Image: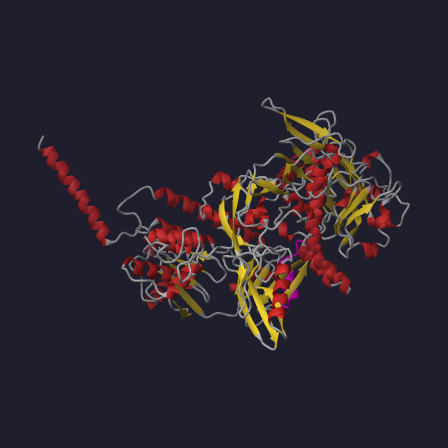
Amino acid sequence: MKLIKLFAVLLILVFASSSFAQGSSQGVAPTEQQLEQFKKLPKSQQKALAEKYGISLDALGFSIDGESSDDQGNKKEPSSILPRDLDKKDSEELTDEEKFKPKEEEIKPFGYELFSGEPTTFAPSENALVPNTYMVGPGDTFSINLYGKESFSGEVIVDREGRLAIDKLQPVNVAGMQYNEVVELIKQKVEQEMIGVKAFVSMGETRTIRVMVLGEAYKPGAYTIPSLSSITHALFVSGGLSEIGSLRNIQLKRAGKTVQTLDLYDLLIKGDSSDDVILKPGDVVFIPPVGKQVTISGEVRRAAIFELKGSESLDEVIAMAGGLKAEAYPQKTVIERFTGNSSKTILQLDLTKDKSYRPKNGDTIKVPASSDELDNAVTLLGAVTYPGNYSWQQGDKVSRLFTSIKSDLLPTADYDYGLVVREVNQKGDIEIHQFSPLEASKQNTESDIELQPRDIIVIFSRFQTKEEEEIALKTLALTKEQLELRERIKLWDKYEEKQFYEFIDLGGSLEKELAEQLAEEESKKITNITDFLNSEEKELKESDYAVFSREKLLKPIIAKLNQQSTYTSQVKMFGIRGEVRFSGVYPLPTNATVKEAVLAAGGLKESTFLDKAEITRYDNSNKSSLNHVTVDLNKALANETSDEFVIQSKDSISIYPIPNWQKDLQIEIVGEVRFPGVYSIRKGEDLTSVLERAGGFTEFSYPQGAIFTRESIRFQEQQQLNKLSEDLRRDIATKSFNSSITDSSLSYKDMDSLITDLAKVKAVGRLVIDLPAIEQGTEHLPLQDKDILYIPTKSNSISVVGEVNFATSHIYNAGLSLDDYINRSGGFKQRADEDRIYIIKASGLVKVPNQSSWFASNEVDELSPGDTIVVPLDTEHVDNLTLWSTATQILYQMGVALAAISSL
């Protein structure tokens, strides 16, 4: 199965490999096509496949080191050694601890990844320009073209004796000569020995040379490389340097002497390749161990471990790291240094001033980042056209941010409610200032608050849900730019939320989540204390709220206020409920009054009773007691300055509706009335008057069968149905632990399915009424909002349902009794409960026939058109087999008991 896993992506190779293995095991040579497919596999997979099936790679012309052979059996030199990653396992299983452990930034030695042993095309091209100083030797090839009296074109190879033999010319010794000298020599000989003929000479294929790469090479040894190769090419061919090899002191030894030293930092950092000289046969490239090293991390462009060559300064080390980033704060640079006594010491430097520091072996230099805090700036968030950071100067006010209230705010913005969130101390505690964007834009007003550095100005939407916002925007004549602006609101939402959470020190995702939970819990606590939101249950999901709604934008502010409250500093929040647009918990601004509280809640509704409102407040002397303060909203909203209108921490404001205020109450009349439809009613209006307004019944109406439904009754019935299904489920679960021969054959799963179906039944909310009596005025029915009355057409049938052989409807006949209708439906079934038959009247009334005596009869007047006869199921019915089985067991037990008694 391992083979299948290896080649799941290339299915054709699976079958090819399988057949290849079978052919080899049976002594049959693999086909050429199979060999080609095998060659395309990575070297590690070739080796694993060969080991699995016992195949010798050498016998197939492949070496384990990844070298392939040609048709004559000569090994081909690879352009590079195998990648180092193939020496490791193809896949390593990570433990759970490793999977979930946070990954730290790994600082690696600089430059080693360039020689990591990956396949490379660094080998010099055969078509590369040969330098004039190139030393010609045995094996080099020259391309010679003769033209003039005679023409000749061919390639001539320098033989082992170093001679170059050209047809019709005397051989000449060229070994050890430079390339340009050989070219001139050939031209001269052609002109001298072949009159009228000239030559064009160029270099063909160059020879290969044998060099050794020793020391801290990844794979030290002897390598055959092109004669144009340099020191770096030898490094590539050997797989690069080991983990302890030096990049700054690579030595080229020739005849036992060091003729060149290569500092790879010059090549990697400065691009200087002047020391990367061409190799000669027999050269040795020696890599000594790495010297002193320092680590530099933090806000530098190239964090890495660097090797020191001498006494480099700190500026030189930073230059190796690419320099400092723009956000670096070098004044607080930290250096960790080994002291030599099994411990470390910490040095703190100001890199802009201290130049005396000299890096030592093992030093770790950490350059910190500057703070993201804004200096002399304010931030504008929310339902604004241009959110973001703005410069601040002494004396700036809110009005500076709103040159035009129409163009600078979104169409959905609330012109009466905005907040300034301001830091008040080094701990990051905040205070809230409330203002009206509309009033602030007029300048020099009380709402035109003077700004401080790092203030955040928040503008809210005047809508709470996305649905309300969309409906409102559809009615507006928006320009193309405003429509594009709406599409960008979603992106602003994410940006602004991040900005604000960072401002109040809730930037992390975990801290943010905890803060939201804290805000929610604290809101619930305040709700329970003040009891001002019990009448409303939030059913909206988080995604249903508008982007800049109070619900979304106030959540982090409330979280921060809860977080900073202590026993000496009360939480700066208040609650408001009742006849306002957005009941809830709000941050308490400085010098807040009832008027600011009303504006924060979106303003008053039409139904507000202005003569009286109530503030529930904690007693300052006794925190466990509450006081109730009555205020006059007319005065509170008239800008009157009085202490009675000032609100305090954790105040709960109740705004009451006008007594007997009612909304548009409506009922619907459907069916056989002269004017069916929806009717507006006054509170407590009787159904009799509405029937008169509807024109009364038509000649086809059947008032006795009227159906009247009420929303409050439907709600109560639904609760009862839900409770019934839960009770049944609990009873079945209890009885499932008991076994009896008389128990139902249904499994618990089947019963649970039945109860689930029962729970899906929707209540109707029908109220049984006597409509003819109501219409005549002898009975009265006060109406409620959303009542529905259905008057059916005259019916002339009787329905029979339940445990009868054929449930159906019959034409009403005044002379037929209840038994007659049942007989016409085929009579009772075996499991019918004949003693519990009941009649559902057309009006919804349930009636049980009188069958209690010999003299009672099925009176004909018990039935009327539209009635339904119900024959219920006998739930206590026992079939004959079960009955006889039970009786037999009882008789058997009695016989055993009698036998036992008789033996005494």
Q: Position of residue 185 (x, y in %)?
A: 62, 63
x 71%, y 48%: residue = 496
Q: Position of residue 615 (x, y in %)?
A: 74, 37
Which one is in front, 390 or 43? 43
- The colour scheme used here is secondary structure
Which one is in front, 788 or 794? 788
**Region rendered in magenta:** 682-695
Q: Is residue 497 magenta?
A: no
Name the residue furthest bottom: 149
x 64%, y 68%: residue = 695
Which one is in front, 691 or 884? 884
Q: Is residue 342 above or below residue 13?
A: above
Q: Position of residue 118 (x, y in %)?
A: 53, 51
Please indicate, yes or no, whether residue 287 appears anywhere in the rendered image.
Answer: yes
x 35%, y 65%: residue = 31
Left or right relative to 823: residue 75: right
Q: Is residue 81 above or below residue 560?
A: below
Q: Is residue 690 magenta?
A: yes
Residue 898, quarter of the rendered image: top left
Q: Position of residue 262 (x, y in %)?
A: 63, 43
User: What is the total number of numbered labels drawn onto the structure image?
Assistant: 0
Name the residue furthest right: 444
Which one is in front, 182 or 565? 182
Left or right relative to 39: residue 183: right
